[in-house]
Image (spheres, grey):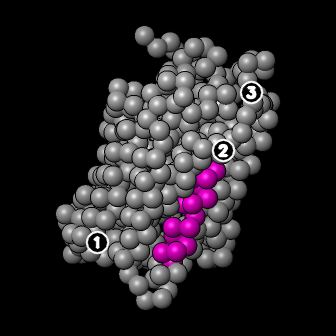
Amino acid sequence: MISRSILLALLGGTTALVVAHAIGRFAYTPLLPYFLADGLFDLQQGAHLATWNYVGYLAGALAAVALYTPARLHLAVPLSLLANTLITVAQGFTQNYEALLVLRLLNGISNGLVFVLAPALVLEWLAQRKSAHLSGLVYLGFAAGLLLTGWLADAPANQLHGAQRWWPMAIVALPLAVLSICLLRRLHLHTADTPGPHATHGRLFDSTSSRLFLAYAGAGLGYILPMTFLPTLAQQQLPAGHSLITGAWQWAALACLLSTPLWNALGARHGDRRALIATYILQAIGTAAPLLWPGVVGITLCAVLVGGTFIGSVLLTQRLGRTLQPHQGPRLSAALIALYGGTQLAGPWLAGLWIGQGGSLTQSFMLGVAALLWAWFWTCSIPRRLPTGAQL
């Protein structure tokens, strides 16, 4: 039976990811087709907005590496979460494209900080209470948040226009941010048990962990194209008014929600390395599906297979990394997230370049397929067992 204090800690981390990662960042995906239809900006500009958001995310994730002491965590998490929420509000009153570029950049910075630090705070608090195995449940909030953002984008679609489409997101984000801040502020860490940013006893990169980093670089680049442009691609490939134009995002979000505990269990039972290889195979098939079977079949497979595997890849990589280097702890986790964020920003940027040269959005998904096959290759190259005998 999970205690009330642990449930409240998980709720605090979960709501933080709903606000900053699901609403602050990924709400842009189901909103993008509406922004394009409203003439707020064009597709190439939309890709540039996504790129600047990922630049900010990388900067935030890198900054988070230095903020692992308890005092810094307790200051950085609420401030970053509050900033992210206020930026979401500001986007609802901004029509100027240059101002949107700045806001999406700032959103990315605050999002990167929250996505790294909020789960880290919850994990450290749970670890000190011998309950670290429950920390992965925090990511269920992000999965549920994807469903929420799809509904918030589609339900009031006929009543709002342009930047106003951010208003429902802001109305939900504000109280959730306050709740999260109140709950996370209650998590007090024991300084003596908490590793600082320089608490490391070995090299971050060795012959085995370097392969995991190389694989994760491909994972970041591979998943971001379908998770940014899926509704827009559905709008291009399907007849006007088709249910999948808005429904594709809901299918992706539902698959994400249902699969998160599944991948956690499969990794525990069959090994994180083997489960991680499976996620990359399925993601590559899902990303290639709109190219191979344009229309309903391709869009549906893309939504279900990519939506149902990318969080699994994140969770399994984090856990596998800790198995490879258990003494590195938060430092390794932050480095992996920063790398993941860095390769993500290349996806929309390259898609924008391709579209600017006359290519199609569908064709740009080939880049994602290649990146996921890269991730699969390097994960397969990780030894099945460590020299200590630990099975991966």
Mark 1 lies on residue? 291
Give the distance between the C-alpha atoms of the residues marked 2 and 3, in whole angstroms. 19 Å
Rendered residue at 33%/39% (across/down): 259
Where is residue 119 drawn, in percent x and y?
59, 34
Give the distance between the C-alpha atoms of the residues marked 1 and 2, in whole angstroms. 36 Å
Left or right: 21 with respect to 202? left
Mark 3 lies on residue? 195
Left or right: 238 with respect to 210? left
User: Mark 1 or 3 closer to N-term?
Assistant: 3
User: Mark 1 or 2 closer to N-term?
Assistant: 2
Where is residue 336 drawn, in percent x and y?
60, 46
In this rendering, the label closer to the viewer, 1 or 2? 2
Where is residue 362 drawn, in percent x and y?
35, 75
Report the amino acid beneath label 2: Phe
| Quarter of the N terminus within the rendering | top left
Give the distance between the C-alpha atoms of the residues marked 1 and 3, in whole angstroms. 46 Å
Report helix, strand or loop for mark 1. helix
In contact (CB < 8 Å): disc 1 and disc 3: no
Q: Which residues are magenta?
A: 338-352
Report the amino acid beneath label 1: Leu
In this rendering, the label closer to the viewer, 2 or 3? 2
Mark 2 lies on residue? 205
Report helix, strand or loop for mark 2. loop
Quick one: 125 or 306, which is closer to the camera?
Answer: 306
